[in-house]
Amino acid sequence: MGTRVKWLAFGGMVLFQLALPGWVIVDHERVLTEGEVFLFRTEPIDPRDPFRGEYVTLNFEAESGQWASPTASTEEYVRSSAFAVLGTDTGGFARIERLTHEQPTGSDFVEVTFMSYGGDGVSRVSLPFDRFYLEEGDGATTEQMLQPQWSNDTLVQPLPAHAVVRILKGRAVIEDLVVGGRSIHEWLKDMPASE
């Protein structure tokens, strides 16, 4: 009887380990198909993840602003998290309307981290999504497209860019990176192959 229980426990553990990656993929796809679309203006840099490949790290304009601190603290510096309730500006881009410790009932929120000083207002938050993964070799090209360049002693600003992010009940997935009104995938497909 003891050996049978051990085999059942082992089999259960194996099934769990096989089911977990499947559940993560299903959850990710659910956000992509059912999530509300938000557009976040970006400022990227280009590193690599040895396990998941090449990506562009994105900084978002929406991470800077002025919000009332949801944390009442007399400590000098407090690192905390809160829910950021999202809205859109007049241009249709995402902005954080307010921070709260109570989880909102709608779907238009994400959990953010922030630093506050003595309970004062919050001026910078970190969104939970900041990496857009690309095919191997496309990171440097994407970074160059998105960074200011010097031409004849004149600084040339890049085309405007934003991330298309799907959000569903606090879960967020970056769906696309749009540069100058076109998907980064279209830009990369139209570029000549490097030798």
Image (cartoon, rainbow, N blue to C red):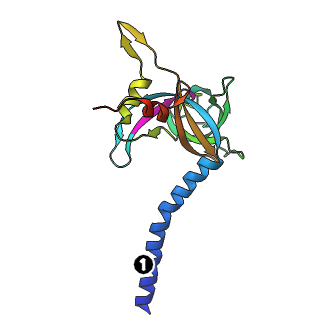
Furthest residue in direction left, as rendered: 195
The residue lying at 52 percent from left, 56 percent from top is: 25
Instruction: Judge left or right: residue 46 versus residue 185.
Output: left
**Which residue matches tag 1?**
10
The secondary structure that dominates the magenta segment is strand
Q: Position of residue 54 (x, y in %)?
A: 37, 40
- Looking at the rendered structure, the kind of residue marked 1 is Phe
Q: Count neighbours of disc 1 (C-alpha within 10 A) and say few if under 14, some if 14 to 19, many if 20 or more.
A: few
**Looking at the figure, which quarter contains the N terminus?**
bottom left
Instruction: Judge left or right: residue 129 versus residue 141.
Output: right
Q: Position of residue 137 (x, y in %)?
A: 34, 37
User: Foreground residue, 45 or 74?
Assistant: 45
The quadrant where residue 125 appears: top right
The residue lying at 35 percent from left, 49 percent from top is: 51
User: Where does the magenta region start and end?
Assistant: 55-62
SS type, badge 1:
helix
